[in-house]
Image: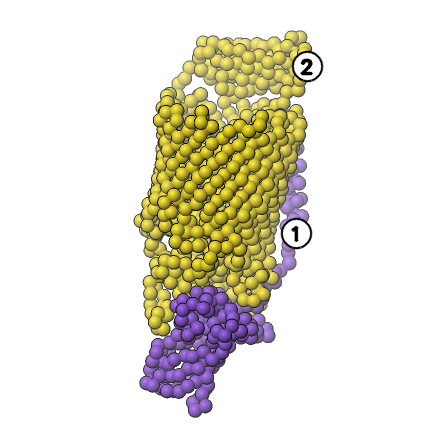
Chain colours: A yellow, B purple
Amino acid sequence: MQSKIFSFCCFCLFCTVGYSQITVSGKITTQDGIPLPGSHVHIGKRIVSSDAAGNYSVKRLAAGNTKVFISYIGFRSIDTTVNLVVDQVLNFTLKIKTDQLQEVVIRQKANKLNKSLLEQNIKMPTIEKFSNQTLGDILKEVAGVSSLKTGSTVVKPVINGLFGSRVPIINNNVRLEDQQWGTEHAPNFDINAAGKITVIKGASGLQYGGDAVGGLVVIEPISVKKDTLFGKTILNMVSNGRGSSISTSLHKGNDKGWSWNALGTYKYMGDKEAPDYVLSNSGNREANFSGDIKFTGKKYDVSGYYSFYNTTIGILSASHTGNVNDLYNSITNKIPSVVNDFTYDINNPKQKVQHHLAKLNYNYYFDETASLAVQYSFQFNKRLEFDVRRGDFNNRAALDLELSTHAVNVDYKKTLHDWSLKSGFNGSFQNNFANPATGIRPLIPNFDRIEFGTYGIVNYDISDSFSVDAGLRYDFSQVEATKFYFKSRWDERGYNSEFADFIVGEQGNQWLAKPSFTFHNISASTGFHKEFGQDLHWYTNVSLATRNPNPSEFFSDGLHHSTGVIELGDLALDKEQAVKLSTTLQKKWTSFSVEVNPFINSIRNFMFLRPVGFETTIRGAFPVWEYQQTNARLAGVDVQTHWKINNQWQHDFALAYVNGRDLTNKEFLIDIPPLNLSNKIQFAKTEWSDLKLEFKSEMVLRQNRFPDNNFITSIVANNELTPVLVDISTPPPAYQLLHFYSEISFKTFGKSSTTIAFSIQNILNTTYRDYLNRQRFFADEMGRNLQLQLKFNY
Amino acid sequence: MKNSKILALVLVSVLTFSSCSDDDPIAVNEEELITTVTTTLTSAGSPTVTMTSRDLDGDGPNLPVVTISGNLSISTTYTGAVTFLNESVTPTEDITKEVKEEGYEHQLFFQAPPAIGVFTYTDLDKNGKPIGLAFTLRTGSAATTGDIVVVLRHKPLKDAAGVAAGSITNAAGSTDASVTYRGVVLR
């Protein structure tokens, strides 16, 4: 209700513009004059249902020839065109189908509710191209999305300069809960399981949560509506890493009755290579399975889904060096401290991650305009991190976390004339268990989290070319952790005055604390989409997002072995609130289209990891990175163009720029992606076995806007302690990469086809480092990579 | 109706799941931690000098506490030994033995200004390479003051140039301990 009022206010704000508005009403009956309630009435772009008396009314239609479509189960549909001039009454009489009383399955159109924000989609052909890469890699195809990496395999998406908890990933309508709080935890998702990936560069996807300060990545699985059975196998072989991957899937589609999908993926990669040396211990393995089974009835469908993601990722040996002394040497020498011969073996340090996701889903379709979805999901994530340790400890994980999440979602959708409404609620319970058997104090403690949320989103079509939307969401969240703090750390953090109540016990030089926090959050989104003639679209959206500190921001405490950095959370952190204004102008000509999307994101209490100096331990001095809060402003622009030069040639251009300011400290924000430009030229000729040739240039400029977090420490040089400046701030220079892609497809037997693709990444074997790679202090990025891909559709 | 039923279901499930994890966690037993590095220098003609660096809160914010029992004598050959203890657990764990047993995977490095003296390894691992738990220090011939840095490297490249002679430059590996005895006086 609240949201309706809210949307109404917004609607008043944007005010209606005068249009020729015609109302069509009438009654739908059988030949015997019996009213047919719930008939499907589709006039122009409007869809309504007839009421209990069979009456309907469609308002504000444009004059002119308009399509009319009336249907009811078991009756012959009426499909006609009416010339509308003035308001009129149209009564329809439906005839019973005399032939076969065929069942008609009611399905609602996937109604996009956030029409005010232009979503970016990645479709199947692109997903297949990236079959042996990661979710983070493929998302870079969208302008404004870059990646935050740890080495070459751990890749997280960055949307308009923001990442991590600010970019929730929704896989098959389930929010991925996989401890991806830290920067070196990649999303646990097999790219081959995606049918379509949507990037929403804002917080307007309120049905998924109110904390998407950066944006949302929504992944939909492959779903086949036709009655068919088909399979697909993709085989990849790559030169860099000397590995291969295979992914096989089978899909049984159906418009009603049973349908199912099954997918298996296996990847095996050895050490990657930079142009000048082997990136030792950068191999990885991955074995994944996912499958679902669905029964579609007349007015409902019910489905079960299960996926298992299992990976082992080697962490660059050279990045595990230890203290500031080693870090300084690494930055100064510019070569990795450990370079061994190529091997497929993965030694410590490494990550072993398993992710299970199981869900049950029930959809009920009241009629073509209304549906209810109920979903229960369970996720279990197990993360083991192994470190270089002495003796038998080497086989024991240094970090052992188990995260279990139960979630229930209920969503209701209704389309009514010019209105569409989506509303629902969700509840979740999460438990994290940090196994103490590791013998190392865990970075993330044990905790329980309970969350409830409810939302409403309304879209109103003022006219065929102008629509507004608005949404409101409320979230409740409670987190309770149990954690041992060194008394010295407790004092150093200044917790004594504010959080003394949290202490419940004492053991030697440690306090046992039970910090507990409760949050009530409001988030909202509103905007409009205006279509001018000649394919000119204007989208504008304002969203308010509220994000609570995540467990790593609250509780991190100690040495992060995989980065050699002491990370410190802060119990005093408050929730972060962002207001993002985003507007997009899209213009299409016959052969050329352009999209310009400027945005500004104002974030209060922006949480970020700031290098603050170093602390000396028995192992030497370690850099200290601390979670801090500030008021930040990110402003930028994403530009995309597409030019269809002729039937064979196409050109694509993308540019992304973002400027991040720390308003409180009057300096630039750390880890903001630099300006990047990409140009792609494609030649395609259907007659030549669907030949496609692509040449792509990727240019990343140097980030000149960065904060100075350098610090001075003493290291041993020529047997004497000497103070040196550790330059952890200066971004690496600009770089340009060239890539090539080619493919041909041909029919083999009957319906089956084969595609052969050959590609080269980093053709010139360019040596470079990337500002947003946490391992940029230790080694260069990957060099040239040749890839052969075989794809069989059968 | 429908919604309230589901809500009830959610509540029940949440309560069931949340009521099963109330046990207090066990404090992590940091068996591997090195808290104390002691370097003992003995010589027949001079008093024994013991240098200790102790950091009981591990990765915590407190600085290691360094104590040096006395001054070194000039132009003297000291017999040196280094021990590693974990004093955060009871009873105290002696890690020296472990380092010795896996001597082929460990090496100590001594760094000090030449005026303080020259360090020479006197122990060997199973491959005939030095470990550094035992050494001699021949002190300089003039009075001076300087810092002595003792580093324990895990999995160093023992075959790399200069490493067997005590140079850390090409040693690589990861640092298990790195302590600085500041202001050692030579008289």
State which chain disc 2 sits on.
A
Residue B67: x, y in percent? 44, 79
Q: CA distance from mark 2 to mark 1?
A: 56 Å
Dot 2: what SS? Answer: loop
Specify few, some or many for label 1: CA neighbours under 10 Å numbering under 14, 14-19, or 20 or more: few
Please name whichever residue, B86 or A717, is drawn nearer the observer in this view of the structure: A717
Q: Mark 2 near mark 1, Cβ–Cβ under 8 Å?
A: no
- The residue at which mark 1 appears reads as B19
Residue located 41% across and 63% down the image: A326
Q: Which mark is residue A725?
A: none
State which chain disc 1 sits on.
B
Residue A388: x, y in percent? 52, 62
* In the depicted structure, whether residue B187 falls above or below residue A619: below
Residue A174: x, y in percent? 57, 40
Q: Quadrant of residue A426?
A: top right
Please name whichever residue, A361 or A144, is drawn nearer the observer in this view of the structure: A144
Q: Quadrant of the C terminus of chain A?
A: top right
* In the depicted structure, whether residue A641 falls above or below residue A74: below
Residue located 34% across and 86% down the image: B141
Q: Quadrant of residue A162?
A: top left
Please name whichever residue, A574 or B108, is drawn nearer the observer in this view of the structure: B108
Q: Are marks 2 and 1 on the same chain?
A: no
- The residue at which mark 2 appears reads as A100
Residue located 49% across and 60% down the image: A561
* In the depicted structure, whether residue B2 falls above or below residue A733: above
Regarding residue A748, the answer to whether it shows in the image is yes
Q: Quadrant of residue A108?
A: top right
Dot 1: what SS? Answer: loop
Q: Amino acid at mark 2?
A: Gln
Specify few, some or many for label 2: CA neighbours under 10 Å numbering under 14, 14-19, or 20 or more: few
Residue located 38% across and 36% down the image: A695
